[in-house]
Amino acid sequence: MSDKIKENVHEDHRQRLRDKFLANPNSLNKHEVLELLLFYAIPRKNVNPLAHHLLDKFGSVNAVFNAQSNELKSIEGIGDSTVAYITMLGKLLELVAEEEIQEGLKFFNLENVKKYLIKFFSSFDKEVFYAFFLSKSEKVIAKFSYTSDRVDEINFLLSEFSRSFANVKPHAVVVAHNHPSGNPEPSRKDDSATEKMYLMFSLSGVKLYDHVIIAGNKVYSYNSDGRLAKIAQSVNSKFDL
């Protein structure tokens, strides 16, 4: 078959798949959706085998869009522009998920945000600390990071919180950090940090809803475990709050 005929066959196939999608978006299976997206990154080539290969290698559409650049580059038929395209779509999906948290979910409900936090922290290979500032309606209005240069501990300055509070004026805060070790159980340093945060937040008129620790796919919640309530009782008693 000549190159011209092959090109026409591929273009006819692409048009049929586009028409099928436009007629009924739900009629496409996973590899067809991925194939349709690849049309716009790789013109004039049969990308059906590549769509199948990506799904076989990574296991899901979501995993494809969250794959590392070097993993994508190792696949035959994928160049830098296609890597950039797939990575961009992955980032877009991440932003959409974050907007869903901000616009539609009550953040302090751990079940609502567990998947989001697991995915959010999955890209970090060292310990990082984030604070999510909430409005009275419990929607995220700001997000701040306090990242330590050391892998083995949370290192943040309470003065940074004070400045953030002055600028944003949150009603409440959910703090979260990750444990690269894979063990989500809080350490003594985590307990000490939570106690200091609770005290400072209380003095600032801000509620601490939860301190969440992410370790891979495991999640620990100070609030759900009752640990936050014990810290609150101890601090309130000690400082007569």
Image (spheres, grey):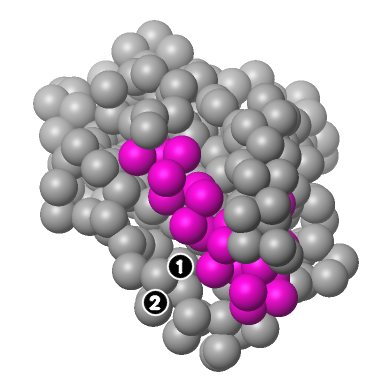
Q: Where is residue 207 in the image (x, y as percent from the top left)?
A: 71, 63
Q: In this view, does 42 lie above or below 51?
A: below
Q: In which quarter of the image is the N terminus?
A: top left
Task: Tell which of 165 and 79 is nearer to you.
Answer: 165
The extreme bottom residue here reads 167
| Residue 63 appears anywhere in the view | no
Q: Where is mark 1, residue-wise?
A: 144
Circle 2: residue type = Glu
Q: In this view, does 77 lie above or below 43?
A: above
Which disc is residue 240 wearing? none
Q: Position of residue 6 (x, y in %)?
A: 33, 29
Q: Give the class, few, some or many, for how many residues have Cα within 10 Å of label 1's Cα (few <14, many ≥20).
A: some
Which region is colored magenta? 189-210
Task: Tell which of 9 and 93 is nearer to you.
Answer: 93
Q: Give the class, few, some or many, for how many residues have Cα within 10 Å of label 2's Cα (few <14, many ≥20).
A: few
Q: Residue at x 86, y 66 (%)?
A: 137
Task: Tell which of 184 and 11 is nearer to you.
Answer: 184
**Where, by quadrant of the figure, is residue 27 drawn?**
top right
* Label 1 close to label 2 by CB (< 8 Å): yes
208 inside magenta stretch: yes
Q: Is residue 59 above or below residue 224?
A: above
* Magenta residues, dominant SS class: helix
Query: Nearer the N terminus, badge 1 or badge 2?
Result: 1
| Residue 238 appears anywhere in the view | yes
Q: How far apart are marks 1 and 2 (CA)?
A: 10 Å
Q: Where is mark 2, residue-wise?
A: 160
**Where, by quadrant of the figure, is residue 141 drawn?**
bottom right
Q: Position of residue 201 (x, y in %)?
A: 60, 67
Report helix, strand or loop for mark 1. Answer: strand
In the drawing, does residue 89 fall left or right of residue 200? left
